[in-house]
Image: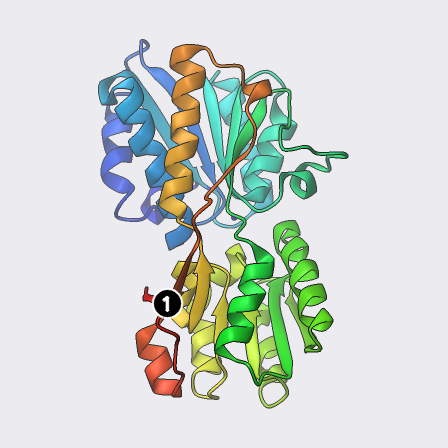
């Protein structure tokens, strides 16, 4: 993984947004639009990191940050992006792949910075992508090393023979991750079972088909899954079916272990890039996509204890 209802914003974002909206009347402020696909902890953290970095770098009183949440709807992302363009925002921050795709379709002149994007080449249909997009787009990626995530799964669950791969088929970022993880697992002799769902209404039914048939569930950095962790937990935990998560917030809610990047950190890096563009006239076309290079092994102590899972000492609690 927009702005529809300010009420959907997380508590952490609301105070900043209210302050920004209160100052909208000042035409001297630098106007920035933030299009966020959906509200959940990971994307909220990235948006907050972006806001904090921009306000630190440009001055809180000098910016008007308009955060819009699309409630998980790509069509709403397009409406939000087009509105930002019509209002002549100085920069657009797109949080999650559908938000980036909508922003890219809306303008070729206003700088666009993405965050929480797994793979820019997939999101933007880029050929021969070398790390720098060019044009008016750059940003940060939430991609953790997928081969290392597979290694984490195999380290904690060495006897797993079949892994269920749970993901939203409507999210290109998830398909990209699942293809890599599936290949890595099968190369190690572990069977996989695709558990794809089209929207949140299908998650429970899809998961129920896996109970008793797989040893572990793997969930990538999938926005729809992240917004429905209660459903995942309500099925997997009673069935003693462990979940390995692609990021920390899903792990906290329904997982056992993860190798996770820091969403606040990538959001903050995105904000620092915005400052370079808006304050120091940095050329966005020459900015390479940035990554969190220090993913951390983490575990959910409550669920691990309940399921009787022993975690190596190299893991830290979420």
- Taking the spot 37% from the left edge, 67% from the top edge, the residue there is 315
Looking at the picture, tell me which residue is in the foreground, 161 or 83.
161
Please state if 56 lies on the left or on the right of 166 as rendered. left
- Taking the spot 35% from the left edge, 27% from the top edge, the residue there is 65
Farthest residue to the front: give it.
313
Q: x, y (%) of residue 119?
A: 62, 44
Q: x, y (%) of residue 166?
A: 60, 69
How is this picture coloured? rainbow
Q: x, y (%) of residue 285?
A: 59, 19
Looking at the picture, tell me which residue is in the foreground, 225 or 302.
302
Farthest residue to the right: give it.
127
Residue 257 sits in which quadrant? bottom left
Q: In which quadrant is the C terminus drawn?
A: bottom left
Residue 174 sits in which quadrant? bottom right
Q: Which residue is mark 1?
A: 315
Q: Is residue 127 above or below residue 181?
A: above
How many other residues sit within 10 Å of disc 1, few (<14), some (14-19) or many (≥20)? some
Residue 134 sits in which quadrant? top right
Q: Is residue 286 above or below residue 19?
A: above
Q: Is residue 266 visible?
A: yes
Q: Circle 1 sits in a helix, a strand or a loop, which is it?
A: loop
Q: x, y (%) of residue 226?
A: 47, 60
Q: Is residue 200 visible?
A: no
């Amino acid at each position: 993984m927009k702005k529809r209802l300010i009420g959907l914003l997380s508590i952490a974002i609301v105070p900043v947004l209210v302050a920004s909206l209160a100052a909208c009347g000042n035409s001297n402020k630098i106007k920035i639009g933030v299009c966020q696909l959906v509200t959940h902890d990971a994307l909220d953290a990235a948006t907050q990191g972006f806001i904090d970095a921009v306000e630190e770098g440009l001055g809180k009183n000098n910016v008007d940050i308009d955060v819009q949440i699309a409630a998980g709807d790509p069509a709403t992302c397009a409406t939000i992006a087009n509105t930002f363009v019509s209002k002549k925002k100085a920069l657009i921050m797109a949080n999650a792949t559908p938000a980036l795709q909508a922003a890219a379709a809306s303008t070729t002149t206003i700088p666009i910075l993405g965050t929480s994007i797994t793979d820019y080449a997939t999101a933007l249909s880029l050929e021969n992508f070398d790390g720098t997009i060019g044009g008016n787009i750059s940003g940060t990626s939430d991609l953790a090393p997928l081969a290392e995530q597979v290694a984490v799964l195999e380290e904690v669950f060495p006897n797993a023979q079949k892994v269920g791969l749970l993901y939203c088929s409507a999210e290109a970022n998830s398909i990209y991750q699942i293809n890599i993880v599936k290949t890595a697992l099968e190369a190690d002799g572990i069977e996989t079972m695709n558990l794809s769902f089209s929207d949140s209404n299908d998650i429970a039914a899809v998961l129920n088909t896996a109970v008793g048939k797989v040893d572990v569930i793997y969930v990538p950095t999938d926005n729809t899954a992240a917004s429905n962790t209660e459903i995942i937990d309500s099925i997997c935990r009673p069935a003693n079916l462990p979940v390995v998560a692609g990021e920390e917030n899903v792990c906290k809610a329904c997982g056992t272990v993860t190798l996770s990047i820091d969403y606040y950190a990538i959001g903050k890096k995105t904000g620092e890039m915005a400052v370079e563009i808006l304050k120091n006239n940095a050329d966005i076309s020459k900015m390479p996509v940035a990554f969190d290079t220090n993913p951390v092994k983490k575990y959910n102590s409550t669920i691990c204890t309940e399921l009787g899972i022993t975690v190596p000492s190299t893991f830290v609690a979420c």
